Image (cartoon, rainbow, N blue to C red):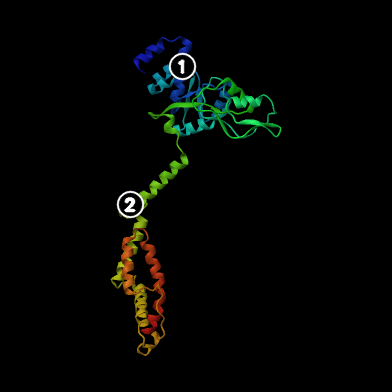
């Protein structure tokens, strides 16, 4: 506690010192401390909100000067400028984002009174007002609503904006809205600022779309993984894919170079068989061919000729994450040729 704050506290009457001590204890016992506006909240509704926050947060209302003393004693001077008007302290062990979301969810619609400033555009919706024909239609028209008597009741013919955000509510408008049961404002604890682990958060910092934020993080993670794979940067997340990719590329290279290896023997035989069949299909004189190759059909598109395989290898070199899958597909296509080559050589 600063010397100035200590001096101010010492000069307080005993009952005020006791109040500051209770506020200080509240601040000390919770991880996040904030200031909330309570203006315009009826006493009963405020009590309901406090009960609704039980187990999540504690709201304590006191004189502004005493709240200021307690914040200064706790070293939370950054919150002091927000002690203005009708405010209270909110204390919680939840993170500031969860606190803000909880406070926003606790807000409820409420009527707006004469002299208040509209928090948003006030619109009287199209439809039947449920009010019998009478002077009320004139009251609606006087505030700018497109209203008339139709089918035995007063009807609003289209959505009518009767006051824009930031404008002051007149007595006539307040009466009309109350008659229609329209509650154009929300009443609740208005979080002005909160400090958690030495970091101050304002409402604009906390007002985020959680689903959109999670989607952005997932997208960033996927792009980072793709970048790491393309850059051949090994991590716990990319190692399996990099190994599979390297295995596929090594196998493709071995097949193109006809490297003799137990792991490639079956594939090399299938490749040679496919090439042999392709060559046999180009010979018009079947008598010049061994019996096993007479009547052989022209290979399908999946049975690649040598030049086609070279082009396929070039395409594989240019691909990123599909190398292993492409090689597997080629292997499946070429396996069918091994039986014919085996029969030719006994």
Which residue occupies the foreground of this view, 115 or 183? Answer: 115
Occupied quadrant, residue 29: top left
x and y percentages locating residue 185 in the rendered image: 55, 27
Crowding at mark 1 (Cα within 10 Å: few <14, some 14-19, many 20+): some
Which sits earlier in the primary sequence, circle 2 or circle 1? Answer: 1
Q: Is residue 151 visible?
A: yes
x and y percentages locating residue 98 in the rendered image: 47, 34
Per the model, the C-alpha gap separating discs 2 and 1 is 55 Å
Occupied quadrant, residue 319: bottom left
Q: Is residue 166 left or right of residue 285?
A: right
Q: Is residue 95 visible?
A: no
At mark 1, the secondary structure is helix
At mark 2, the secondary structure is helix
- In the rendered image, the quadrant that contains the C terminus is bottom left
Q: Which residue is mark 2?
A: 228
Q: Which residue is mark 1?
A: 64
Which residue occupies the foreground of this view, 163 or 237? Answer: 163
Q: Is residue 345 left or right of residue 190?
A: left
Q: Is residue 121 left or right of residue 252?
A: right
Q: Are marks 2 and 1 in contact (CB under 8 Å)?
A: no
* Residue at horizontal 68 percent and vertical 29 percent from the top: 131
From what the image shows, is residue 284 above or below residue 190? below
């Amino acid at each position: 506690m600063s010397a100035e704050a200590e001096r101010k506290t010492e000069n307080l009457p005993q009952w005020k010192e006791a109040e500051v001590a209770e506020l200080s204890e509240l601040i000390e016992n919770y991880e996040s401390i904030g200031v909330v506006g309570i203006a315009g909240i009826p006493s009963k509704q405020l009590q309901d909100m406090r009960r609704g926050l039980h187990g999540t947060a504690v709201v304590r209302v006191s004189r502004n000067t005493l709240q200021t003393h307690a914040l200064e004693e706790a070293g939370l001077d950054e919150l002091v400028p927000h002690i203005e008007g009708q405010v209270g302290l909110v204390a919680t062990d939840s993170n500031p984002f969860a606190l803000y979301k909880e406070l926003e969810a606790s807000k409820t619609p409420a009527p707006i009174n004469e002299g208040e400033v509209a928090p948003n555009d006030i619109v009287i919706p199209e439809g039947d007002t449920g009010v019998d024909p009478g002077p009320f239609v004139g009251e609606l028209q006087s505030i700018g609503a497109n209203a008339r008597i139709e089918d035995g009741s007063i009807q609003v013919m289209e959505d009518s904006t009767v006051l824009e955000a930031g404008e002051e509510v007149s007595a006539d408008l307040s009466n009309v809205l109350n008659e229609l049961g329209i509650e154009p404002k929300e009443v609740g604890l208005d979080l002005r600022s909160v400090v958690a682990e030495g970091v101050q958060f304002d409402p604009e910092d906390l007002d985020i779309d959680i689903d959109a934020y999670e989607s952005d993080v997932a997208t960033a993670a996927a792009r980072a993984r793709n970048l790491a794979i393309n850059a051949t940067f090994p991590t716990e997340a990319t190692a399996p894919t990099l190994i599979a990719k390297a295995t596929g590329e090594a196998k493709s290279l071995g097949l193109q170079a006809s490297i003799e290896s137990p792991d490639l023997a079956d594939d090399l035989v299938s490749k040679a068989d496919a090439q042999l069949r392709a060559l046999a299909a180009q010979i018009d004189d079947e008598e010049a061919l061994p019996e096993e190759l007479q009547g052989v059909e022209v290979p399908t598109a999946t049975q690649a000729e040598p030049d086609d395989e070279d082009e396929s290898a070039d395409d594989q070199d240019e691909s990123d994450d599909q190398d292993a899958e492409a090689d597997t597909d080629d292997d499946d296509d070429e396996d069918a040729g091994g039986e014919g080559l085996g029969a030719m050589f006994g």
